[in-house]
Amino acid sequence: MPYSLIDPIRRFQIKTAKLHIKADSILSEKSTLPYWKFRYLSEGLMLETWQSWNSFCRISIINSCLGCLCTDGIQITARTGDNSWQRIGFIFKSKTIAKGLLKSSHNEPTWGDIDKLIAAASNLKTVNELALLSAFGLPTLNESAKHMQTVRNCIAHKNPETINNVKKLYLYYSVPSGDMRPHELIWQDNASGEIAYFSWLADLRQMAVLSGLSVP
């Protein structure tokens, strides 16, 4: 079966639609939930969303390297070189071809990291390189993924440094006065008056759609 970007994007759209429903449910029940449960559900939602984004980015990059059918109907050819997932992952994680010359049997990177996505899209030299760079390189969209990663990292690794990184994001959102837990940021309004989580989800979906093209 030929590789494709169509199915991964479709699956990601379905998954994010389900995540949106989960978020709506959490918000609707917030007033009746014990705080610990609201926190647990919010943190779980963030972890699930970040994992879904990483999984999508992984298959998008790997399929692009293997050669695949794009959403505009164009079949792109495989990149030159070793296209095993181990090799692609190693180059992705190393961020530069120069560092990627050493072989690694297993080196699973953070596929959803925007800076690494942009570097990898350039370094891997896939046929759809420009489309990937355009999709993942738009500041108006990728800022959401960066903010989401910051909050997710704090949820997964709570320490003074990660908490401080989340606090640096406060200037982008309407946050209440006083102390606020990291997971609470996802429910605050952004400058456009939209709840942060829903804005992030919409931007991830848009990046996914753009990444499916053969050319920007």
Image: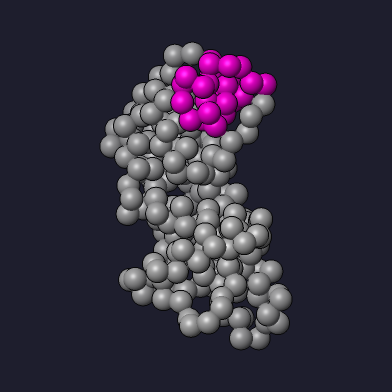
Q: Which residues are magenta?
A: 82-105
Which residue is drawn at the image coordinates 40% and 54% (left, top)?
A: 143
Q: Note whether residue 91 is visible.
A: yes
Task: Give the residue displayed 48% in from the left and 81% down from the top.
Answer: 176
Q: Is residue 11 left or right of residue 158?
A: left
Q: Does residue 9 belong to the magenta stretch? A: no
Residue that protrudes farthest toward the bottom in the picture:
31
Taking the view exactly as shown, the residue that stands out farthest to the front is: 160
* Quadrant for the N terminus in the image: top right
Examine the image and state in which quarter residue 214 appears: top left
Is 101 colored magenta in this rendering? Answer: yes
Q: Is residue 81 above or below residue 201?
A: above
Q: In which quadrant of the rendered image does the C terminus lie?
A: top left
| Nearer the observer, 29 or 101 | 101
Seen as rendered, the residue at the extreme top is 81
Residue 7, horizontal then vertical, whole percent: 49, 40
Which residue is located at x 67 percent, y 26 percent? 106
How many marks the image carries: the answer is: 0
| Image spot of residue 177 (x, y percent) | 48, 83
